[in-house]
Amino acid sequence: MKLRRLTAGALAAFSAAAMLLGSVANAADAPPVTIPVILPLTGPGAFIGQTHQKTMQILADVVNKEGGIKGRPVKFDYLDDQTSPAVAKQLGTQAQTQSPIVLGSSLSAMCQALAPVFESGPVNWCFSPAIFPPKGSYVFSTSASTKDLLIATVRFFREKGWKKFALLASQDASGQDGVNDTAEALKLPENSGMSLVATERYNGSDVTATAQVTRIKAAGPQALIIWAPGTPFATGLRAVQDIGLDVPVLSTSANMVAKQLEQYGAFMPKTLYFAGVTYAAGIAQNPRVKHAQDVYYAAMKAAGVTPDLQTGLPWDTGMMAVEALRKLGPTATGAQVRDYIAGLKDYPGILGMYDFTKVPQRGVGLDAVVMMQWTGSGWATSSSFGGALK
């Protein structure tokens, strides 16, 4: 029997395939690169934390199928902060010696508690857009900031002709961010004709907010912002229905969780908007961003997960964290990882083109925000970039 000789092209293809299989096999057999991820897996923020956990599990599968980090699989170690700032701080103290980068938490109250722990490193990358780390620090924040989200919101209201609006906010760090950032948005010259006719607060543990919404209704707003993440959002929505306040409602993007909203169907307002982001709206700034989004969409579909803002919020952060360790190696220091991220630019993520030299500690800004409406089973895009009407 004659042996066939492989052509040069076939030999090259065989060698490439063998190398790919070898790298995947090595990644599966090698000791993992462990990255701690602090999340609110229980407590009022569990909807959000569990969604972020699922996303990170999907991301790990994608990364490891591509060979992991220098031939080693990535492993995310999930730590439950119980939606408690004190617990988050304790977990951060434990995790800071385990990796040059620690991801999470998901909400601003926990992230603010974590920030002092990482003042001298390693890197902490918060999944909430509602914190504002100082330039050059070891702390980074995910997505467009809440300031940008609320600037887009007020712009959207203005262009809709809703010049009088009210704010119902939770009595926590997230709610205070909403109050402060709304005030900042109203200081912009283009919003001189806008009026915040009422601001009311309620505790996350309150069983009702009817008194607050009664006062809001008396002020005659044309739209209402409910800035309360997680299960307290439901308390606000029930009060709106109970009082019969029939105006468009907008909430923080932290509540853009399809499974969460589906459970609120019995007391959902007629019109519910969110200051969303580009990937949730299916909008890409250029072909490179579209490619990143296509990878994300395919991974979500394969896992049986419906993409929404919260499923995507940790995605770019996780990918850039992996990219940093691929570039620098798993034994990199926190300072090396910080400097790498701080210098990263022209990076295509699902949110847009990142440039940390222009937008320190965050990488993206107002152009990544897109207003979206909940349809009862999904999302409809209601604006173009920055909240401007189409």
Image: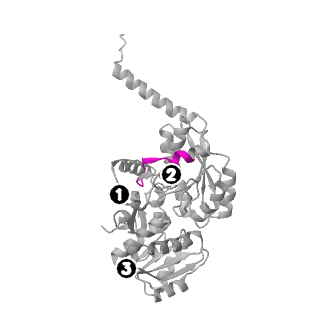
Q: In this view, does 228 lie above or below 140?
A: below
Instruction: For the C terminus, give its image quadrant.
Output: bottom left
Residue 347 locus on image (x, y percent): 43, 47
Q: How far is disc 3 from disc 2 in space, using C-alphas?
A: 35 Å
Q: Which residue is nearer to you in this view: 263 or 8?
A: 8
**Protein image colouring:** one colour
Residue 212, labelled with which disc?
none
As drawn, the label of residue 317 is 2
Magenta stretch: residue 349 in it? yes
**Type of amino acid under label 1:** Ile
Q: Mark 1 sits on what residue? A: 283
Q: Nearer the viewer, residue 226 or 144?
A: 144
Residue closer to the observer: 346 or 201: 346
Kindly report which numbered mark, 3 or 1, lies closer to the viewer in this rendering: 3
Residue 62 part of the magenta segment: no
Classify mark 2: helix, strand or loop.
Answer: helix
Q: Mark 3 points at which residue?
A: 162
First reached walking from the N terminus: tag 3 or tag 2: 3
Q: Residues within 10 Å of mark 1 (few under 14, many from 20)?
A: many
239 to the left or right of 99: left
Q: How far apart are the alpha carbons under marks 3 and 1? A: 25 Å
